[in-house]
C-alpha cells in the first residue's frame, strides 16, 4: 500500500504517523503519540505472545531444575557431603549442569557450590566428581 505519509510525520489533529510493527498486523498505518510502535490491539497481542513465550521458557527451566533436584536427593545418601561421586553418574541420570542454580563460595574454603532448593553440589574438576551437600551443611566447608 502506498502511504501518503512517512513514518514519524506529524499531522495536526491526528498525531504522529506510524507503521505498526506487529508482524501479523493487516492494516499497518496509524496515528498516535510520538513513540508508539503498535496499534493498541496489536500491542496487546504482542504482550500476550511475549508473556506466553516467557512462561514456556520458565516452565522448561523449572522442569530441568526439578529433575536436577530429584537426582541430588537420590544421590545424597551416597555422598552425604563427604564422598565424591563420578560426575558421569549424575549425567547418566539426566542431570543438566547448565540448568539454573544459585552459586555461592563457601566461607571456610571458598569452594564454588551450586545450590538448588536445599541441596548443593560442588564439582571437583581434577577428579571429574561431585560432592552433594545439604544446603545447611555448607557452613562447615
Ligand atoms: Zn497493528
Image: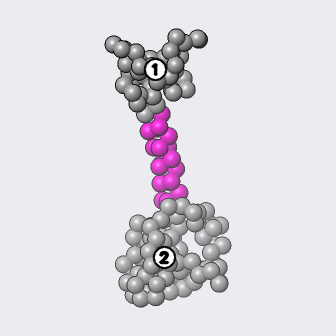
Q: Which residue is mark 1?
A: 9
Quadrant occupied by the N terminus: top right
Q: Quadrant of residue 96?
A: bottom right
Q: Quadrant of residue 115?
A: bottom left
Residues drawn in magenta: 49-66
Query: x, y percentage for residue 109?
Result: 46, 88
Is 120 in front, or is 4?
4
- Residue sitting at 50 percent across and 70 percent down? 72
Q: Residue furthest left?
A: 13
Quadrant occupied by the C terminus: bottom left
Q: How is the image coloured?
A: one colour
Question: In this picture, is 60 found above or below 49?
Answer: below
Q: Horizontal placement of 40 versus 87: left or right?
A: left
Can residue 42 be seen at all in this image of the molecule? no
Q: Of marks 2 and 1, which one's residue comes earlier in the chain?
A: 1
Characterize the local packing of mark 2: few (<14), some (14-19) or many (20 or more) Cα atoms within 10 angstroms.
many
Q: State how far apart marks 2 and 1 are (Cα).
A: 56 Å
19 within the magenta span: no
Give residue 113's mark: 2
Characterize the local packing of mark 1: few (<14), some (14-19) or many (20 or more) Cα atoms within 10 angstroms.
few
Give residue 101's mark: none
Can residue 64 be seen at all in this image of the molecule? yes
Which element type, helix, strand or loop, lies under badge 2? strand
Which element type, helix, strand or loop, lies under badge 1? loop
Amino acid at each position: 500500500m502506498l502511504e501518503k505519509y512517512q513514518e514519524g510525520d506529524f499531522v495536526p489533529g491526528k498525531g504522529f504517523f506510524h507503521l505498526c510493527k506487529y508482524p501479523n498486523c493487516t492494516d499497518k498505518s496509524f496515528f498516535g503519540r510520538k513513540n508508539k510502535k503498535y496499534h493498541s490491539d496489536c500491542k496487546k497481542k504482542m504482550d500476550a505472545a511475549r508473556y506466553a513465550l516467557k512462561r514456556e521458557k520458565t516452565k522448561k527451566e523449572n522442569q530441568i531444575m526439578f529433575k536436577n533436584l530429584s537426582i541430588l536427593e537420590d544421590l545424597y545418601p551416597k555422598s552425604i557431603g563427604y564422598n565424591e561421586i563420578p560426575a558421569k553418574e549424575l549425567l547418566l541420570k539426566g542431570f543438566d549442569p547448565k540448568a539454573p542454580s544459585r552459586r555461592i563460595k563457601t566461607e571456610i574454603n571458598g569452594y564454588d557450590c551450586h545450590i538448588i532448593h536445599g541441596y548443593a553440589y560442588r564439582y571437583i574438576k581434577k577428579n571429574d566428581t561431585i560432592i552433594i551437600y545439604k544446603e545447611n551443611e555448607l557452613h562447615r566447608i
